[in-house]
Image: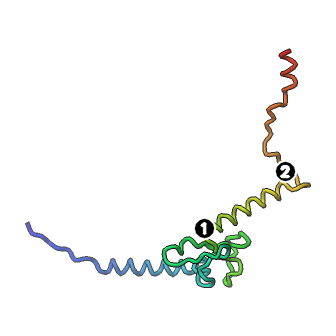
Amino acid sequence: MSSKKTQPDISAGDRIVEMARQQRAQREKGYRAQALKLYPNICARCGREFGGDNLRELTVHHKDHNHDNNPPDGSNWELLCLYCHDNEHARYLVADDRNAMAPGKQSEPPSTHSPFADLGTLLKRDR
């Protein structure tokens, strides 16, 4: 039995490294990478600082809630930690609900079921 040792394909490793570099360049073109270059790594609401391993917990919030509005100067962005970002979106949803139920606006009732609609008829029938 002859044992052949295969040499590693160095060119495959080079291709992987080049692909990783290209993917990194594409990510850096994204708004998150741009925002991280423009602003300090601090939550704009709570002031918590981020770096190293916990930098992934810092998110980009679109002030106008339009994720397609990404001006290169970053004027529609602010960096928020995960908790403040979730809180901001929850407040936005609550505001939408309140606006939908504002006086003078026509909206559907939350439920059309009326459990006591025929209660009078049922009580008269049992007597």
Kind of residue indicated by mark 1? Leu
Q: Are discs 2 and 1 less than 8 Å apart at CB? A: no
Residue 54 left/right relative to 97: left
Q: Nearer the viewer, mark 2 or mark 1?
A: 1
Q: Which residue is mark 2?
A: 107
Which of the 4 quarters of the picture holds residue 14? bottom left
Which of the two residues, 64 or 80, is positioned nearer the viewer here?
Answer: 80
Identify the image quadrant of the C terminus.
top right
Q: Which residue is mark 1?
A: 82
Local crowd at mark 2 within 10 Å, few (<14), some, or many (≥20)?
A: few
Residue 2 left/right relative to 93: left
Residue 43 percent location from the top left of the image? 63, 75
Residue 114 percent location from the top left of the image? 81, 35
Rendered residue at 61%/71% (across/down): 81
Local crowd at mark 1 within 10 Å, few (<14), some, or many (≥20)?
A: some
In the image, is residue 127 above or below residue 25?
above
Kind of residue indicated by mark 2? Ser
Rendered residue at 54%/75% (across/down): 55
